[in-house]
């Protein structure tokens, strides 16, 4: 169900508090310098996965790639095996995923997603290619029909690494019944309709648990401090 | 059904659908309509980003590492150089005036090959459809053009019915929908949308199973719709 525009929260009103700075200060600074509102982009910590990804994107740093491979490839393999992929095939697909990481690292923007989130989307797409043999349409950022926010999100100031940490904790604290459904959907490649059929839970129960889980994750105190109120 | 209950179910369906898209579990037809909706809704793009962040965290801490084969890293390193050279060229998108004038988001445009006119088919008085072909066998993708004030037949859904409003407006028991709105119905909901009295309505619809009509008209039309 859509939300009419009027029901959407006033993003601008909630974010300065959430981000821990005063809206008036920002206004004053922008007025002083008379430059377009440039926000300082937070640089990832030197030894983080995000920094490794940036090093690959900026200077094809092979050492950084090796470190990233050693951390992520065994996890991607594990992720793929959870959906029933045979070990050898999962190994190959994890290699393919890491090759795509190398190829596309210059498109990675640390202010938009944590390294694990970005790599997850690539592994997910490899899994779709393997099993479905059909395309997964995505929105095109250059589409003239693209509707953008009137008020841009202060994405550059969100600390994606702290966000990822908070998300991990929140996931661990999810009630078992909600966590189960989330894992079924992300790991076992099943739609909620398929999960309902399989578990013999009424569709309404499955979907309301998903909604509760999503709400819990998005409204988690720590995440909320990083994200502007979004729902 | 009370409007409030319908609204609640519709909201559950909406979020579950966006999470399915982020988790990568939707078929091509459903992904096509969600991608089109994401083009028109920055709000929805954020929900999908959040759901992708859930996927990232699951990958990071709930996938216990399983050792790669001993030569995997060496193999990949060997291939890095050649991969660097064969970067994907960005696909040039050919613009089509007809499709642009219909205000269709690019994910839908990519599926339509006619450039001069669309061969619309009449499905019901005041309602015309154009079918979009995908590889999905259990999902049907259609553009629907509905004349102003046309009351569509009341129907329930055996599977899911996802509607993206592209132009004009429509209303049913639970609200009014306009450009960019996505309405996700499942077997729990029966509804009877009416096209706006002035503008009519133009939408993209994905049915994942044949729909069933519930009113008297259903008795007449069901055998045809399920074909």
Image (tube, coloured by chain):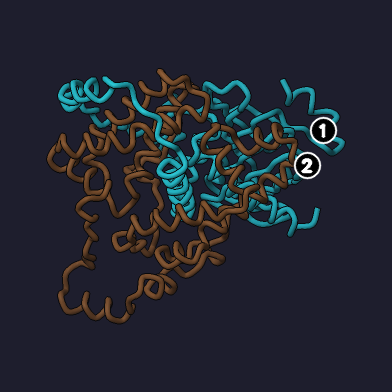
Q: Is residue B102 visible?
A: no
Q: Nearer the viewer, residue A203 or A87?
A: A87
Chain letter matching colour brown: A
Pointers 1 and 2 in contact (CB under 8 A)?
Answer: yes
* Residue shown at 39% from the left, 53% from the top: A164
- Disc 1 sits on a residue from what chain? B
* Residue shown at 23% from the left, 65% from the top: A39
* Residue shown at 40% from the left, 18% from the top: A88
Mark sitting on residue A5: none
Residue A231 in the image: above or below residue B171? below
- Residue indicated by mark 2: B154
Percent of width and height locating residue A27: 27, 78
Q: Secondary structure at mark 1?
A: helix
Percent of width and height locating residue B82: 17, 21
Chain letter matching colour cyan: B
Q: Nearer the viewer, residue B207 or B45?
A: B45
* Residue shown at 62% from the left, 48% from the top: A176
Residue A139 in the image: above or below residue B181? above
Q: Nearer the viewer, residue A96 or B147?
A: A96
Per the model, the C-alpha gap separating discs 1 and 2 is 8 Å
Percent of width and height locating residue B120: 58, 28
How many C-alpha atoms fall within 10 Å of the one at disc 1: few (<14), some, or many (≥20)? some
Q: Quadrant of the C terminus of chain B?
A: top right
Please report whichever mark, 1 or 2, sits nearer to the chain's N-terminal start. Answer: 2
Residue A121 in the image: above or below residue B85? below
Determine whether, in the image, residue A141 is placed left or right of residue A215. left
Determine whether, in the image, residue B19 is placed left or right of residue A147. right
- Residue indicated by mark 1: B218
The lab-note entry on whether marks 1 and 2 share a chain reads yes
């Amino acid at each position: 169900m859509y939300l009419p525009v009027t029901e959407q929260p006033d993003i601008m009103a909630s974010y300065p508090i959430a981000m821990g700075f005063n809206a008036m200060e920002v206004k004053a600074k922008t007025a002083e310098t008379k430059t377009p509102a440039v926000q300082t982009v937070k640089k990832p910590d030197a030894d983080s996965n995000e920094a490794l990804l940036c090093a690959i994107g900026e200077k094809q740093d092979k050492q950084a790639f090796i470190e990233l491979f050693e951390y992520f490839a065994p996890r991607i393999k594990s992720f793929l095996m959870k959906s029933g992929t045979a070990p050898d095939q999962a190994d190959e697909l994890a290699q393919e995923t890491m090759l795509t990481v190398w190829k596309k690292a210059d498109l990675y923007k640390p202010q938009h997603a944590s390294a694990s989130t970005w790599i997850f989307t690539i592994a997910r797409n490899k899994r779709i290619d393997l099993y479905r043999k059909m395309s997964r349409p995505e929105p095109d950022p250059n589409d003239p029909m693209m509707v953008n926010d009137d008020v841009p999100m202060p994405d550059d100031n969100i600390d994606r690494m702290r966000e990822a940490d908070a998300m991990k904790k929140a996931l661990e604290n999810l009630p078992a019944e909600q966590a189960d459904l989330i894992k079924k959907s992300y790991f076992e490649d099943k739609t909620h309709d398929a999960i309902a059929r399989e578990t013999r839970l009424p569709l309404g129960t499955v979907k309301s648990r998903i909604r509760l889980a999503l709400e819990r994750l998005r409204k988690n105190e720590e995440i909320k401090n990083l994200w502007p109120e979004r729902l | 059904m009370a409007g409030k209950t319908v609204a609640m179910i519709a909201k559950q369906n909406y979020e579950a659908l966006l999470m399915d898209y982020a988790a990568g579990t939707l078929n091509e037809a459903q992904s096509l309509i969600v991608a089109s909706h994401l083009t028109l809704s920055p709000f929805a793009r954020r929900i999908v980003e959040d759901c992708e962040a859930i996927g990232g965290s699951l990958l990071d801490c709930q996938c216990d590492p399983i050792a790669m084969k001993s030569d995997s890293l060496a193999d990949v390193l060997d291939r890095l150089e050649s991969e660097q050279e064969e970067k994907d060229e960005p696909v040039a998108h050919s613009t089509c005036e007809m499709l642009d004038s219909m205000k269709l988001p690019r994910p839908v445009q990519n599926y339509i090959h006619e450039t001069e006119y669309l061969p619309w088919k009449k499905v019901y008085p005041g309602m015309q459809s154009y079918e979009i072909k995908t590889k999905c066998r259990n999902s049907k993708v259609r553009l629907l053009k509905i004349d102003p004030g046309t009351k569509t037949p009341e129907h329930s859904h055996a599977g899911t019915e996802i509607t993206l409003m592209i132009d004009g407006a429509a209303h049913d028991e639970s609200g009014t929908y306009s450009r960019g709105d996505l309405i996700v119905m499942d077997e729990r909901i029966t509804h009877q949308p009416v096209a706006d009295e002035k503008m009519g309505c133009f939408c993209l619809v994905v049915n994942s199973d044949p729909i069933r009509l519930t009113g008297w008209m259903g008795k007449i039309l069901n055998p045809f719709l399920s074909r």
